[in-house]
Image (spheres, rainbow, N blue to C red):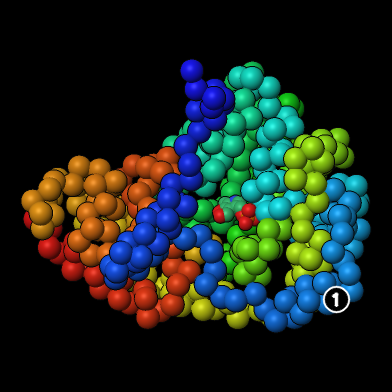
Amino acid sequence: MSIISDSLKRVKPSPTISVTQKVRELRAAGKDVIGLGAGEPDFDTPLNIKNAAIRAIKKGDTKYTAVDGTPALKKAIVNKFKRENKLNYSIDQITVGSGGKQVIYNAFMATLNKGDEVIIPAPFWVSYPDMVLLSGGKPKIIKCTQKENFKLTPTKLRKAITKKTKWLILNSPSNPTGLGYTKKEIQDLAQVLIRNKKIFILSDDIYEHVKYDNFNFFTIAQISKLKNRTLTMNGVSKSYAMTGWRIGYAAGPKDLIKAIGKIQSQSTSNPSSISQAAAVEALNGPQGFIKMRSKAFKERRDFVVKSLNAIDGIECLNPDGAFYVFPSCKGLMGKKDSNGKELKTDTDFVRSLLETSGIAVVQGSAFGLEGFFRISYATSMKNLKKALDKISIFCKGLN
Ligand code: PLP
């Protein structure tokens, strides 16, 4: 008999974290590996934010805080939503957790009964289905094609809804595709949702600030009549290069926010007091860092997309934001690598690329869509140039 619970048996460890771990192991074994798997900015946290944390330590802000966030941080979040999204929330509509990941997990734990369905457009962020499974719910994966720019259409949404649907997850700009929903696309989906009064929407806006060109970011609560059924989730990890500080937050209906806090009160309690002080500075302090960083990411995106599209057998859409591309490797299927091994799936492609060329990317099937792979370009141009050269040589060497 196993000591492991049934719900945990349904869950697999995060494949993106596994790739990062594999890169660490190969490097430790002396191999020259470029990791393009990690989902975190390579920039350092801005100094004003670090200094705010140091001040908090010196001042003695080192005790438990309110479970779901300090009043100062909640106020900063209320102001952020007002300033950037024209959304009005009261303090008791805000919750803060140890990363957006915890907030989403708590939201599912607090709301899902056995058999409740969560609509997840694929490709998706790897953690969504497993968090739903852990909470006893049922992920309903809806595949969105490259032709659809990997985005959910109103027709597909309508077909996916059943009596058991409890949540729809929207993530824009998206991990893993980098594509974002336009205002009209969100409003068209809202038209479907408005008729189904029991469905809640999780808007995962974590990449709000990593966007390019003329892409205008909108979040569903801001541009529909669904605010009272939407959990608008965001965090400081990606916007302010603060992945290690573990601060995420959400705004939504009071009863849901209270329920999320209740789970947290019996699990981790408050997020780190020091990280919360740092997040106050991130949200209230100078915002110039965001623009500067997006400019650097845009240069990398342009280079990566152009280099990939120059390779025979690879096709890559141009992302609106985030720091990922999600190219197709379907044109290379059936070819053989230098060891004579036939590439039948995206996983074969990714494995062979790592073993023969030392480039670590993540297979599309990990994100729910086969025939693709994800590259994170949150690394230096020097690394990207070297990596894209090697990918090109690897692909040319297939026959
Ligand atoms: N949502 C998406 C789409 C992500 O890619 C991530 C992190 O990779 C998160 C949420 C969670 O971020 P964090 O827990 O660092 O706030």
User: What's the amino acid at mark 1?
Assistant: Lys
Which corner quadrant of the image does residue 116 belong to?
Answer: top right
Label 1 crowd (10 A; few <14 / some 14-19 / many >=20): few
User: Residue 94, percent across and down?
Assistant: 83, 50
Q: Is residue 258 left or right of residue 353?
A: right
Q: Is mark 1 within 8 Å of ligand 1?
A: no
Q: Please name the residue shown 45% across and 72% down the image.
A: 379
Q: Residue at x 64, y 19 (%)?
A: 114
Where 113 sits versus 125, above or below?
Answer: above
Which residue corresponds to the image point at 87% horizontal and 59% vertical from the top-left?
Answer: 63
Left of 228 or right of it: where is 2? left
- Which residue in the structure is indicated by mark 1? 58
Res. 338 visible in picture: yes
Horizontal side of 251 relative to 371 (left or right) equals: right
Query: Where is residue 370 shown, x and y percent of the image?
Result: 34, 42
Answer above or below: position of 123 versus 178: above
What is the count of numbered marks? Answer: 1
Q: Residue at 86% of width from left, 35% of height from top?
A: 255
Q: Secondary structure at mark 1?
A: helix
Q: Position of residue 43 (x, y in %)?
A: 56, 75
Front-lying residue, 136 or 153: 136
The image position of residue 126, as x and y in percent, is 50, 45
In the image, residue 282 sits, relative to residue 352, either above or below, namely: below
Q: Is residue 374 visible?
A: no
Q: Quadrant of the C terminus?
A: bottom left
